[in-house]
Image (cartoon, rainbow, N blue to C red):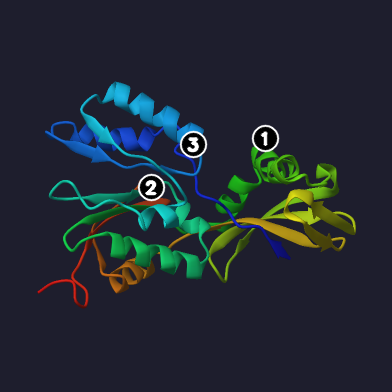
């Protein structure tokens, strides 16, 4: 099995962000620092938000989450909240997740907040069906990774020589998406001077999506001095939203 890492997720329509901005509208001053790896998406979304929220002060970062967290400016207001919605935390493997949460802790001052969205554990057949949808949307999304590599790095992936696979890894509580090579082949990415040899039946892991247990996640956050104050779930407990507050750590508070 080979592994291709994921980049940061896009802002998209900022639908979830708008819900928060609407709630904070009564404040006299509101600052927002969005993060995205796409300059175009970040710029168009920021301009749209500024049109709808004319008093908003906005400073965007064209970075990965990890890069941007290390460059956040000092807080301009008396309080601050980092927001990580969707379920992107589940796309990080365990070491990367621990590093990310450490960065969140280091970016916040004691008393500041962290709002985190996560996908929760549920029946395996429900999870696997979502990643093997009958419409073929996930298949197209997965194979498009190879097309993107071809276009950006002069690759020679032939898409019909791969098959989409998605299955639940019960030991790690995560869905895994793979692309299975149907033949023995050598792939070249000319712009990177990189070659990869695949045997027939060998897979490339293109994405992971961990499903969390709330109790275990609370313990993990507490270890990072991020104490959950309030937790919300939907009616089926398929998705969780945790409001955490940065606590004092060693050397943080007098």
Query: Which residue position holds label 1?
Result: 135
Query: Which residue position holds label 2?
Result: 85
At a point 36% along the width and 58% down the height, the residue shown is 70
Query: Mark 2 near mark 3, Cβ–Cβ under 8 Å?
Result: no
Q: Looking at the image, is mark 3 or mark 1 earlier in the sequence?
A: 3
Q: Secondary structure at mark 3?
A: helix
Q: Name the residue furthest bottom.
A: 250
At a point 81% along the width and 43% down the height, the residue shown is 159
Q: Secondary structure at mark 2?
A: loop
Q: Residues within 10 Å of mark 1 (few under 14, many from 20)?
A: few
Q: CA distance from mark 3 to mark 1?
A: 31 Å
Camera-nearest label, 3 or 1: 3
Position of residue 235 measured from the top left corner of the image (x, y, whole percent): 35, 46
Position of residue 11 measured from the top left corner of the image (x, y, whole percent): 44, 38
Evaluate whether residue 237 shows in this view: no
Q: Secondary structure at mark 1?
A: loop
Instruction: Give above or below for 76 relative to 17.
Output: below
Evaluate whether residue 43 shows in this view: yes
């Amino acid at each position: 099995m080979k592994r291709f890492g994921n980049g940061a997720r896009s802002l998209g329509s900022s639908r979830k962000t708008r819900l928060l901005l609407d709630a904070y509208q009564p404040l006299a001053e509101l600052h927002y620092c969005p993060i995205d790896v796409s300059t175009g998406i970040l710029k168009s979304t920021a301009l749209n938000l500024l049109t709808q929220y004319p008093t908003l002060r906005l400073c965007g970062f064209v970075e990965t989450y990890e890069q941007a967290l290390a460059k956040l400016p000092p807080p301009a207001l008396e309080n601050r909240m980092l927001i990580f919605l969707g379920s992107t935390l589940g796309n990080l493997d365990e070491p990367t997740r621990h590093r990310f949460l450490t960065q969140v802790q280091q970016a916040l001052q004691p008393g500041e907040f962290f709002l985190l969205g996560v996908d929760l554990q549920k029946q395996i057949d429900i999870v696997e069906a979502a990643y093997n949808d009958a419409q073929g949307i996930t298949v197209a999304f997965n194979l498009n990774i190879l097309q993107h590599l071809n276009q950006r790095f002069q690759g020679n992936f032939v898409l019909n020589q791969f098959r989409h696979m998605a299955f639940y890894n019960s030991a790690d509580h995560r869905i895994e998406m793979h692309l299975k090579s149907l033949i023995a082949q050598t792939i070249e990415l000319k712009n990177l001077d990189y070659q990869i040899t695949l045997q027939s039946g060998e897979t490339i892991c293109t994405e992971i999506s961990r499903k969390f247990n709330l109790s275990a996640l609370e313990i993990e956050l507490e270890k990072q001095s991020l104490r959950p104050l309030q937790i919300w779930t939907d009616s089926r407990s398929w998705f969780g939203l945790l409001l955490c507050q940065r606590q004092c750590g060693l050397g943080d508070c007098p």
